[in-house]
Image (spheres, rainbow, N blue to C red):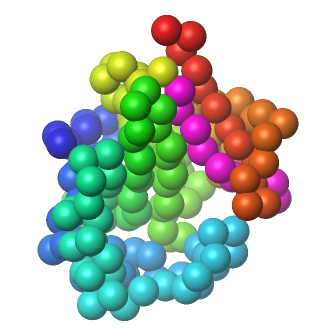
Amino acid sequence: MDAIETPLLTLVPLDPEHADEMAAALSDPALHTYIGGAPLTASELRQRYERLVAGPPGWRNWVIRLRADDRLVGYVQATVEGRTAEVAWVVGTPWQGRGLAVAAAKALVDRLLDEGIETVVAHIHPDHAASAAVASAAGLSPTDRWHDGEVRWERTTGA
């Protein structure tokens, strides 16, 4: 898995060594309003990252490095099965509202489509307008399908 470069960001393949910096970036409990749970400690995050890195090849995870500040500000992930990828993104509270989630999500979706993925899916809480805006900017559209209380968004190439 390679890094993904954009003018604003570098999506860096996840490594357990990112845990300390990411624990700080993701420490705001408000990040969990729509996704549930609570912020993890650096130790808990390191253990989680070890599991993710060791997981099946379809588990693809990157941390988001803000180029201007050379600091980690969030993550993107894709779970690939066949020609379908389910994606998600999280940007730490201090960096929200700056277009970083849009840049990261677009870069991720573009990479997946370049790799032959035909359908990209995201599940978004119906009240999470910011995440819906990110999905829309990445070319996904809401469907009439729901999963665990979230709206299924899709982008299909028709290939």
Left-right relation of 33 to 24: right
- Quarter of the image containing the N terminus? top left
Q: Residue at x 25, y 37 (%)?
A: 5
Query: Where 113 sits versus 142, above or below?
Result: above
Q: Main secondary structure of the magenta part?
A: strand
Q: Residue at x 73, y 61 (%)?
A: 148
| x and y, in percent, of residue 153 in the image | 68, 38
Query: Where 73 sits versus 66, above or below?
Result: below
Residue 126, quarter of the rendered image: bottom right
| x and y, in percent, of residue 127 in the image | 82, 59
Residue 49, quarter of the rendered image: bottom left
Q: Residue at x 48, y 32 (%)?
A: 84
- In the image, residue 43 lies in the stretch drawn in magenta: no
Is residue 69 visible in the rendered image? The answer is: no
18 or 114, which lies in front?
114
| x and y, in percent, of residue 118 in the image | 48, 21
Is residue 143 visible in the rendered image? The answer is: yes
Q: Residue at x 26, y 71 (%)?
A: 51
- In the image, residue 123 lies in the stretch drawn in magenta: yes
Left-right relation of 21 to 104: left
Left-right relation of 128 to 32: right
101 or 148, which lies in front?
148
Query: Where 41 sits versus 21, above or below?
Result: below
152 or 82, which lies in front?
82
126 or 106, which lies in front?
126
Residue stretch rendered in magenta on the structure: 119-128
Number of numbered callouts drawn: 0
| x and y, in percent, of residue 69 in the image | 27, 60
